Amino acid sequence: MKPYYYLILILLSWLVLSPCTCLPSVIHNRSNNIQCIDTERDALLQFKHGVTADYCGLLTSWEANTNCCRWTGVVCSNLTGHVITVSLPSRVNSQCLEGKVSPSLGELKHLEHLNLRNNDFRGEIPHQLGNLSKLTTLDLYSSYASTSLPYFAYAGGPGQISWISRLTLLRYLDLSYANLSAITNWVTIVNNLPSLRVLRMDWCLLPTKIPSPISYINSSTNLHTISLSHNNFNESSILRWLFNFPKITNQLVYLDLSWNVFDVPIPSEFEKFQFLSYLSLSRNAFQGSVLKIISNLCDLEQLDLSFNNFTDELSNVIDSLNNCNKNRLITLNLQMNGFWGAVPGSIGEFSMLESLYVNSNSLEGTLTHVHFLNLLHLRELDLSDNPKLVINIYENWIPPFQLDVIGLRSCKLGPRFPKWLQVQKNFSYFDVSISGISGSTPVSFWNSLSSNLQYLNMSNNQFYGILPNLPNISNAFEIDLSSNLFEGVVPSGFEQTSYLYLNSNRFSSCSNILCPIESFSRKLDLSNNLFSGELPDCWMNFRQLKNLHLENNQLSGHIPNSIGTLLNLQTLHLYNNSFSGPFPAVFESCTSLMILNLGYNLFSGSIPPWIGNAFDGLGALILRKNNFIGEIPESICQLYMLQILDLAINHFSGVIPNCIGNITMMTGINNLGLHFEPDVLYLNTLSNVVTNSETAIVSWKGEEQRFKETIRFVKYIALSNNELSGEIPDGISRLTALGALDLSGNKLSGNIPFEIGNLTALEVLNLSNNHLTGKIPRSLAKVTTLDVMDVSNNHLSGEIPVSTQLQSFDASSYAGNSGLCGAPLQSCSKDRAPSNVPNGDITTVQNKDDDFGFFLGLYISVVLGFIVGFWGVCGTLVIKTSWRYAYFRFLDNIKNRIM
């Protein structure tokens, strides 16, 4: 037997007979004879003491006097008994642990893996973790962190995470959502981790500027994953640090720089990363062409260039990727750029493609079934918001794929509902809104809707017919069937939908959805239909409801008492119905209200005095065109957040409260008002839906307008067509952010407030059809934003102040004031006295600035006249002797003649 055979035999014997020292030490402990070390058990119990909540029962086995090596999430070495792993991650979308990370973990000197991922730990990460010299994995990622307030925070200087540099064996580091905004030397810390392979620091608020020079002496040469998204990077120095990392061009396979603010031409250095399989530059402002970069990336599986300013022709992009990626590419996201041209047929050569997002570009041309023939694995398709894109697929074609995401908004799909879409059975996202489809929807389509459905949008088409019951869509987050021609009874099946839009159809009954056992609705929009009769009294089942739209129907009767149980209700729109009765007392319980619109109904009685105390956040109170009477209560001035006050076309009497100038939201142009936090439906890593875009109908510049996102900027007061009397309060001049003021059609008297020119944001001013006297204040000439002004049919007099704005209005804006003159009316005569001033008002003190100017001029004229007259005569007589003698001889002669 040859000598090396003996050597092999000896080695095999040793492997069989010796303890299994070659097995990885991270094998989960199942042997009963491995006992944990007391000091390490005590350290783990101190960690448990810092946990304030355990929703998943992860720490229920963590009890004193028990073997910690058998605790959930704890792994001990089979040889030494030392704790080498603490792994307590929460599941995705599930928060398990709350509390603080105890410094006691620093006592686990042999710890190799620490994973606290997806939990809710707050406060500082203890620096004692720097003692864990054997640590190879540190994962403190928390998906529960707020985008504006990351969970882990640092109050001190940049030295607070320098301890990480001591972890020289660290291969995996994830500090995502830790607030590192004060850590100016974070690059230095990363560069001193020689074993690092994975770096994840998303949502860390990392400082943009990097100190120079940068040393790479101790840097890792094995770094293959870098994720630095959501950090607001805008400095090219970050990119230079990245491009100069040692050997990174041969190692890097995963790079995520998404959600930053790089506003530069795309650097050509990206082409050096030839081994990238994942590249995301999404949500930046990179510019220029991507062709040179992507043509060299031949290992790409996922490419996300969305939300940038790239402007290539799409066919060139597809051809560049096809050169070496057609059998590899899985995800291609190019949405929200400036890509243009036709979608090439070569798109179908990506045989492994699962996700294709080219929505919101400038694409055109026609797509046929040929484009999709080879896309056997396609699951997500979004071509939305390319209005010149035509999708013309022959009627009987059956796709080789089943889609999960179908986005075809604003594409040309019609005129009939495509049959190839009807055979899609498992989608969770479906959007064919504004796509030119008309006709009835096949019952088979409705019946095929699966329990996977989360988002369905078929709005703004010409679908008609009666909807069947929809029992399979109980998990849907949002359904939008608005702006179609659906009719009849709203079917059952929508009760669990969070956001339901059935507005602008021809539905006549909604009884099936208004009295469920329990509803999860947050927004319910039934406006602009044919609903009639009284509302049922079962709103206590809508406990999560935030927005209720019932406007523009034929509803009547009193408001049911159960509306008062909607404690989360933020907006209530009952506009243009036939509701009646006094101002509903049940609203006093709806303390979260931000918009209350009761306009164009038959409500009567007075506004209750409690209104100022009930709604701390009320931004819009619209009672237009009802039968309300009585005075406007002063308590309305306590609605400090109010930005829309519309009490027009009622029977209010008395005076306008002077305290109206105390409404804080209208006193500053920078005060942003009504704002509704959007809810986001996360469908996958590429597609999500932002919803809850709230609206308000406002009478603006003479017509009804619907405001959405811009509602926060709308600030106006409309008290027109009532029976209000007295003067316009001076306090109204303090509302410097006011955009519109309509007091027309009342019995207001006295002068226009002298300081009305302080309303420098005013776009609409209507004071017509009152009994106002005096002059138009000269301060109004300072308001350069006026688009609409009407002071007609009053008793105003004097010259219209000269300004670019005031002379631009038609003469009808000043008609019915016979004492007014000046452009655009007839010119003022110098000796013309106002003829329309009532007897007894001639001696009244006129407009403050005009009176002051008149008397000031009078005083100056008298004084100057006296000086000139006195010294012009007497001074001459003193200086000129011959004139003095002649003057006195003249006086003597006159005296003698008289004698």
Image: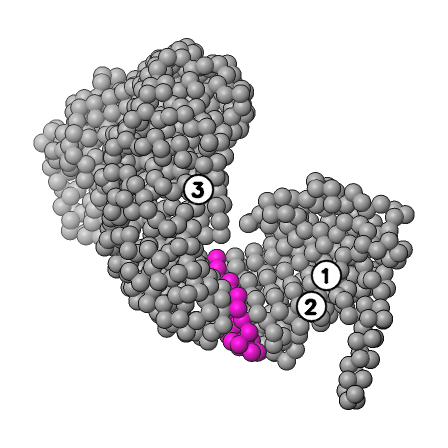
Outermost residue, left side: 897
For the image, the number of numbered tags is 3
Residue 395 is a magenta residue: no
Q: Quadrant of residue 459?
A: top left
Residue at image point 38% right, 58% down? 334
Seen in the picture, residue 238 relative to 33 is either above or below; the reply is: below
Q: Residues within 10 Å of mark 2 (few under 14, many from 20)?
A: many
Image spot of residue 718 (x, y percent): 34, 26
Query: From mark 2 to mark 1, how far is it between C-alphas?
Result: 9 Å
Which quadrant does the C terminus fall into? top left
Disc nearest the viewer among 3 and 1: 3
Considering only order in the chain, which callout, 1 or 2, is on the residue closer to the N terminus? 1
Front residue (pair 157, 161):
161
Residue type, mark 3 in image: Asn
| Mark drawn on residue 113 | 1
| Mark drawn on residue 426 | 3
Query: From mark 3 to mark 2, how far is it between C-alphas?
Result: 43 Å
Seen in the picture, residue 16 relative to 844 is either above or below; the reply is: below
Image spot of residue 783 (x, y percent): 30, 40
Residue type, mark 2 in image: Leu
Front residue (pair 370, 83):
370
- The magenta span reads 236-260
Q: Is residue 509 in view from this perspective?
A: yes
Q: Quadrant of residue 437?
A: top left
Residue at image point 77% right, 87% down? 4
Name the secondary structure under disc 3: loop
Query: From mark 3 to mark 1, how far is it between C-alphas?
Result: 40 Å
